[in-house]
Amino acid sequence: MVTISEFQSGSARSRVETAIAKARENESFHAILNLYEERALQQADRVDNGEVTGRLAGVPFIAKDNFLTFGGVTTAASSFLENFEAPLQSTAIEKLEAEGAICIGKANLDAFAHGGSTENSAFGPTKNAIDETKVAGGSSGGSAVVVALGIVPFALGTDTGGSIRQPASFNGVIGVKPTYGTVSRYGVVAMASSTDTIGVLSSSVDDATLVMDIMSGKDDKDMTTLPDFFVPSVLEGQLKIGVIKESMTDDVDADVRAVTDAYIEKLKASGHSVEEVSLSLLKYALGIYYIVVPAEISSNLGRYDGIRYGKRAEAATLSDLYGKSRDQGFVTENKRRIMIGSYVLSSGFFDAYYLQAQKARTLLINEFNSLFENFDVLISPVAPTPAFGLGENTNDPVKMYLADVMTVPASLAGLPAISVPAGKSNTGLPIGVQLIGQRRTDSRLLALAKQVEEK
Amino acid sequence: MTQISIDDVQHLAQLSSLQLDDAEATALQGDLQNILGYIEQLSELDTTGVEPTYQVTDLENVWRDDVVDTYGIEKESLTGLAPASEANQIKVPKVL
């Protein structure tokens, strides 16, 4: 893997060319959907002639293909948007470009970010960076793999229920899902608006912190952004850390537990106090998530009607046009989620499913709040297993969803959570641990990860 | 446990503006049944008197001035995205 500082010598053009060459050498992983070579080289020349300066001058990066960008198509890994050229750029991309960073291409994902393995991409799955027979994780699978392969020092992802953290864990990179509202979502394809967040995957904590510092902040184009609060910090004093005991049961892979325990020992060695705590509602979090999120998806994906943009199917009537365009443009997992959303929002089922889930969400948030009265940080594994096999879970949606069981609670509560590489399974697959904090304590989580990284 | 029939699947597809072929509808019948079976466990929770949470920002009433802001995007670049357009209007099949 490479860091930003290793990408700050030589001309910007040579750095972009190096990254693009490395991307081409690694095409077999199918981590990248499109390279924006022409625009990237133009940007590099602007850095080299002094027109553009900044903290990331000439540093190449890759964005998940649900960020709207200039330079090529933005597909969300769907056939619906296969030829879509965005008329605007997302705020996150604009902020990085203003600091001289150069987007060299777009990373693969599960179509519309629906999935946990990148196998739902309309253009084929991404392979794990360490073992090509395993999944990359998802939905930001391509973003995790390009960082793990050392193509670029950082990549952008989105995390609605674990889509940055889980692929980060599966490929051995750092993944940051910030406090809900930290980074503007303007110009990013919406999935579930009450939990969608934008974050970064990188090889070092310092790099992740720098990118978050640049991307975060209030944006008039996204009314859900919080007032500026993210300031990089250094850890001072000892923290009280709680281990979520429900995440360390026998159902969890033994290697995952062993790696998490070893990380806990490092935290203790740094002087922090660590105690077991209970998040009793953990087992209900996935049920809440798979009601709330499909409900929001069914609404957000209503915009894909074949009328205003994207692919339109041939049809004689308007209702046929909608039905056929959507049938052809969505992958099966998109349809499952839209239909579950329609079901839980239907009159007659609304109270039993949607309203019950939003009430249960309140109970989950209350439980987190009471834990944070006594603890600064919570720790758990990122996922119950290391990367699973390609094709292993594709015929069983519920089994696929269970990979999200430890990441969805922080999403539902809007909490910052980061995935930190912590070790390997006995077969050599990366395993990450998850650090969860109270809202707006993102930089403290990063400082804690940094302290352990230096051990 | 909730039973989902093929008719239910087709009704949900219609609510969702999806035209499914028979094979896909049959496959989705099993999937939806399993997913609903899983999420039904929430009925175990006592939520009497609990307020629902719809958003987690704590922000309320974020105002802006009531003025047109194009965000720097030309109308033509948006209408030009439509699969069929003419004279800066989006074309659709006959509605009536």
Image (cartoon, rainbow, N blue to C red):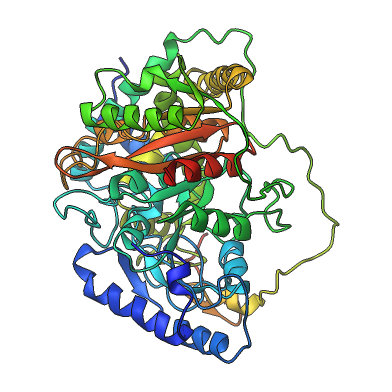
Horizontally, residue A275 falls left or right of residue A261, namely right
Check the picture and name the quadrant holding the N terminus of chain A: bottom left
Quarter placement of the C terminus of chain A: top left
Residue A117 seen by the camera: no
Vertical arrangement, residue A245 with respect to residue A338, above or below: above
Residue found 61% across the figure and 63% down from its top: A91
State the residue in front, A125 or B72.
A125
Q: Nearer the viewer, residue A349 or B10?
A: A349
Q: Position of residue A390 (x, y in %)?
A: 17, 48
Q: On the rendered structure, is A237 left or right of A384?
A: right
Q: Is residue A300 left or right of residue A455?
A: right
Residue furthest out toward the bottom: A49
Query: Up-down: is B5 above or below A425?
Result: above
Judge from the rendering whether residue B86 lies leftward or rightward of residue A11; answer left or right: right
- At 42% from the left and 47% from the top, the residue drawn is A164
Could you tell me if residue A280 is visible in this image? yes
Callout count: 0
Residue A117 x %, y %: 28, 47
Residue A48: percent from left, percent from top:
54, 89
Location of residue A417 with respect to A374 vertically, above or below: below
Question: Which quadrant of the view contains residue A370?
Answer: top right
As drawn, A453 above or below A244: below
Residue B84 drawn at (x, y percent):
47, 75
